[in-house]
Image (tube, rainbow, N blue to C red):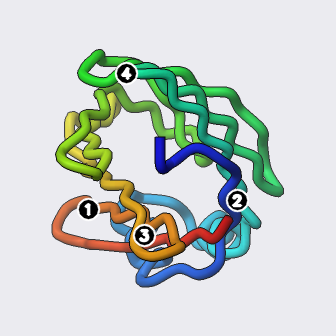
């Protein structure tokens, strides 16, 4: 339940390099690095409801821990995978539909921040949010 609430992007680490590894073109990388993303979490047991709003889109996402679901990134990349809870950390494993490559994602609360870590093709990036 620690994730519950609204989190606004504060800063990124290596995010443009990560987007480049994902195949996002330069214009979208520049825009994506300044997307003003806000995520609202609501957890009910194993079920999560998220609302992601940015300069580019607003979407609602529902998932249940351990159950595969489909998701589309802001650049249109389609993924399938699931989130699981490991201790106090949300751990996601997603497979790209276009090339079968795996994207790993973690979300955890560190101090008063929500830290999202992404790993794709050996490139790691972080997005840090504050309430």
Name the residue carrying label 3: 20
Q: Position of residue 31 (x, y in %)?
A: 71, 69
| SS at badge 3 | helix
Rounded to the nearest whole Å, what is the CA distance between mark 1 and mark 3? 12 Å
Q: Give the residue drawn at x 70%, y 52%.
A: 6
Name the residue carrying label 1: 119
Q: Nearer the viewer, mark 2 or mark 4?
A: 4
| Residue placed most toward the observer, 28 or 11 | 11
- Indicate the quadrant containing the C terminus: top left, top right, bottom left or bottom right: bottom right
| SS at badge 4 | loop
Q: Are marks 4 and 3 in contact (CB under 8 Å)?
A: no
Instruction: Name which of mark 2 and mark 4 comes first in the sequence.
Output: 2
Rounded to the nearest whole Å, what is the CA distance between mark 2 and mark 4? 24 Å
Q: Nearer the viewer, mark 4 or mark 3?
A: 4
Instruction: Give the answer, above or below, for where 90 lies relative to 51.
Output: below
| SS at badge 1 | strand
Name the residue carrying label 2: 37
Callout 2 crowding tier (Cα within 10 Å): few <14, some 14–19, many ≥20: many
Instruction: Name which of mark 4 and mark 3 comes first in the sequence.
Output: 3
Q: Nearer the viewer, mark 1 or mark 3?
A: 1
Q: Position of residue 76 (x, y in %)?
A: 57, 38
Q: Please indicate, yes or no, whether residue 113 appears anywhere in the rendered image.
A: yes
Instruction: Give the answer, above or below, for where 115 lies relative to 85.
Output: below
Task: Kindly identify which numbered label has been placed on residue 46.
Answer: 4
Rounded to the nearest whole Å, what is the CA distance between mark 4 and mark 3? 33 Å
- Determine the residue located farthest toward the right in the rendered image: 55
Q: Are marks 1 and 2 in contact (CB under 8 Å)?
A: no
């Amino acid at each position: 339940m620690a994730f519950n609430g609204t989190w606004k992007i504060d800063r990124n680490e290596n995010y443009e390099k990560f987007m480049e590894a994902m195949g996002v073109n330069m214009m979208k990388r520049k825009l994506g690095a300044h997307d003003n993303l806000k995520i609202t979490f609501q957890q009910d047991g194993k079920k999560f409801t998220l609302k992601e709003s940015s300069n580019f889109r607003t979407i609602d996402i529902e998932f249940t821990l351990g159950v595969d679901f489909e998701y589309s990134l802001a650049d249109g990349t389609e993924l399938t995978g699931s989130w699981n809870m490991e201790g106090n950390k949300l751990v996601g494993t997603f497979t790209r539909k276009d090339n079968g490559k795996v994207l790993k994602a973690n979300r955890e609360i560190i101090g008063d921040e929500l830290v999202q870590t992404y790993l794709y093709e050996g490139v790691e990036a972080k997005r840090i949010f504050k309430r």
